[in-house]
Image (cartoon, helix red, strand yellow):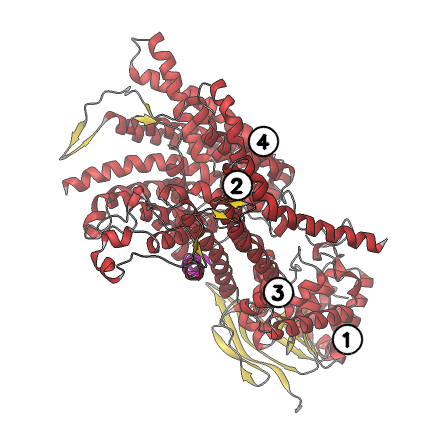
Amino acid sequence: MDVLLQQVINGLVLGSMYALVALGYTMVYGIINLINFAHGEVLMIGALCSWSIIGFLQPLMPDTPGWVLLIISMVLASIAAAALNYAIEKIAYRPLRNAPKLAPLITAIGMSILLQTLAMIVWKPNYKPFPSLLPTTPFEIGEAVITPTQLMILGLTAVALAVLSWLVNRTKLGRAMRATAENPQVASLMGVKPDVVISATFVIGAVLATIAGVMWAMNYGTAHHVMGFLPGLKAFTAAVFGGIGNLGGAVVGGLLLGLIESIGSGYLGEITGGVLGSHYTDILAFIVLIVTLTLRPSGLLGERVADRA
Amino acid sequence: MISTMTHKFFSNRWALALLLLTLPLMLQNVGHAWVRIADMSLLYVLLALGLNIVVGYAGLLDLGYVAFFAVGAYLYALLASPHLTDVFPWISVMFPDGLHLSLWLVLPMAAGLAGLFGVLLGAPTLKLRGDYLAIVTLGFGEIIRVFLNNLDQPVNITNGPKGLGQIDAVTVVGYPLSKQLDLGFIQLPSVTLYYYLFLTLVVVSVVVCHRLEYSRIGRAWMAIREDEIAAKAMGLNTRNLKLMAFGMGATFGGLSGAMFAAFQGFVSPESFSLMESVMIVAMVVLGGLGHLPGVILGAVLLAALPEALRYVAGPLQSMTDGRLNAAILRQLLIALAMITIMLWRPRGLWPTPEHGKSLNPQGGAR
Amino acid sequence: MSTAELVLNVSGISKRFGGLQALTDISMRIERGQVYGLIGPNGAGKTTFFNVITGLYTPDSGSFELAGQPYEPTEVHLVAQAGIARTFQNIRLFAEMTALENVMVGRHVRTGSGLLGAIFRTKKFMAEEAAIAQRAHELLDYVGISAFADYKARTLSYGDQRRLEIARALATDPQLIALDEPAAGMNATEKTQLRALIDKIRNDHRTVLLIEHDVKLVMGLCDRVTVLDDGKVIAEGTPADVQRNPHVINAYLGTGGH
């Protein structure tokens, strides 16, 4: 039971990060029906930028508490990632809005590879140790422990979700986004500029992914150019699981997937009698995807995709 | 005038054939490495042709095609190397001379097993729409790789990340292609012998694909690609047709994989990564979806060009402090190619010709 | 009571979607060689009924008989096999394929060569391909667009695309050809041509089910008409009868259908 509690905690932490990235996928898909394959790479770029910024600032500001450096680097990295994502959308995706359906998919895949390769060139392929900027002594909850980093992940995610919720439900931009997601033609007739909304979606997605990326690097202690691929894929799975296009679905899907992976990897060996060890954990997410698409393709909370008459 | 036109056409065809047949002979004098590049290019052409059936004809975006390449490769590797006899004593008792396979057995077995996998992996995807299909097939490709990497326990079938080595070369009428062939007036090294074998396979494959394209099944596939709902309304059993496309396309992958294993003499899960699947998709889409000449062009460009770049990579590597090596350059170029060609020519470099004129600029529904 | 052969015998079809009773006890008798019209105001259930016939929805109750045999399409692709071909309100052609190829696909359900025939170019395959091509050319000629045989379907004009769709449907050798609002978006000239084509199809002893909004077209063309309103049949008979029916006038014609 106590191991279970630990796994639940780990699962929620993992799931929070998945949720942040899943939101990016789901928002983009909800509006322009594109799986942005490169989104996982935004996570990676955010993390690596943050690493560079911290590496640059630390010697300059040796007495600053770790969490301040963390926040500064996150903000700066978010700006960089947002600018990058905005540029990507404008240069590579926007011209293909009306192209044959395979073209934007190919471009997105190409973009993903490009970002990974550029990261490898700029930052070199070695795995970089991410400085632990928060105290490492864990807190005890019953028989389980939770580290300050994990607490920060949960906290930051909650804050980010609250801000996003306010943005989507209480601001003009948010209304525009929801309208465009539902019916782009009608929205544009009402004076909403689809380009602005779409750019905003990419920017917001980048910020969320950067937060997730930095926290991921802090949690696992390293940052490197392929760190975004698998989490990106899994976050997409989470988005589908929860209901693509549905913001609440992305969060629910992310958290649940994190739990499934965490608890699952613990018991995978037991369930399969030792045949499948924990290196098969990555397949769990994929199984979730297949089962979802087969049994309930619209996801747990139902999908919300733009109505393109 | 007509006779000069037909004359030109035929001389073109013959010129091309002559070029293809003498290419290795010319290249081998420059260096065997160049013939190797040609050999690998031919194997990639086979892969692209197979994927073209799935993506180009039937419109099913398969991002895990490398799985079939792996199936063919590992099948041959297991049945033509000492691995199984080493690991399982009962097998070495049954085959005291070791496990070896003749070419005439390899080809149908690899094609058949891969085809079966094609149907198996395609079956769960039948109801999925475009992008979801892509992700699921991507996942399947990765799953196959994970299994290949981990099936060394509890029973060592695939030898995990260490891979399988000492794979037999292909033998044609008793002659192993790993041995140079001395014809007196000319020597044909192993790489050249393999070239002719692969070229034969490619030619046969092109004929098969062409025949499929211009047939009832080919038209049915294209109808599904264009509008699945209308296709069903016309009585097409789209489920069976899609499975046929997956299966048929996969057979080419299996064939290529088996040949790859024989050629390299060694296989490991590393050769069957997602990047490979992506590259094959890029070959088909960038070359010209559904158009055989375009697909072949795409395969040759993406396979040969990065290899040729190795020779340029040297100086670049020292210029950039080791950050740009041949592998990275290759990846960079493929990625840039994917992005720029889609922006500039979304239908590919050499798409199906528009053999109909546009009557009405405003005519028609789409 | 006519002793003419019944192509489609519809009995008591009902369909409910959640809280909405879309169709209630629909019955219809379509005789061979008739052009049978189905009209009704928007939301009357025409499309739902159409989708039930073509296998997209399963009825809650009721039954069909197609040419005397029980007809229960469980999957969409079995509909054409059984003998009902349809066109689409929004025109669904195979855009990148030529007009000829589009019609050739229509022959798929009546032919049988598979992968082996294609790859080995067997005699049976070659003969079948020749027959398919010939029939396709005949049909293109029949609907009047043989000049565009090698043109990609998406390059044809709107009216020609409609004809192509009809040719493709005819290629399946149907017992019944169901046209879903074929006159939508057409101007007067095109409608006249369409009417001539449907007449021609009837004269060749084929049976047509016509769902249309254009009341004038329906009344001038159809042998018999069923009028739906709110999921129920409110009138059935010859166009002349139906036009005089007060329920119909109330529900539909009275609002300026002429």
Q: Which residue is mark 3?
A: B215
Q: Position of residue A45 (x, y in %)?
A: 43, 27
Marks 3 and 4, how far apart at CA:
42 Å
**Residue name at image x 62 percent, y 65 percent:** B215
- Neighbour tally class for label 3: few under 14, some 14-19, many 20 plus, Cα within 10 Å: many
Marks 3 and 2, how far apart at CA:
35 Å
Whether residue A163 is visible to the viewer of this picture, yes or no, is yes
Between disc 3 and disc 2, whose residue precedes? 2
Q: Is residue C168 left or right of residue B61?
A: right
Q: Which residue is mark 1?
A: C199
Q: Are marks 3 and 2 on the same chain?
A: yes
Disc number for residue A90: 4
User: Could you tell me if the residues under marks 2 and 4 are in contact, i.e. CB atoms within 8 Å?
Assistant: no
The residue mark sitting in front, 2 or 1, is 2
Q: Position of residue B330 (x, y in %)?
A: 50, 33
Q: Secondary structure at mark 4?
A: helix
Q: Are marks 1 and 3 on the same chain?
A: no
Boundaries of the magenta span: B112-126
**Residue name at image x 40 percent, y 42 percent:** B271
The residue mark sitting in front, 1 or 3, is 3
Farthest residue in the right direction? Answer: B1
Q: Chain of mark 3?
A: B
**Front residue of this view, candidates A206 and B305:** B305
Q: Chain of mark 4?
A: A
Marks 1 and 3, how far apart at CA:
34 Å
Q: Amino acid at mark 3?
A: Ser
Q: Is residue C144 magenta?
A: no
Q: Amino acid at mark 4?
A: Lys
Q: Chain of mark 1?
A: C
Marks 2 and 1, how far apart at CA:
67 Å
Disc number for residue B35: 2
**Residue name at image x 78 percent, y 53 percent:** B7
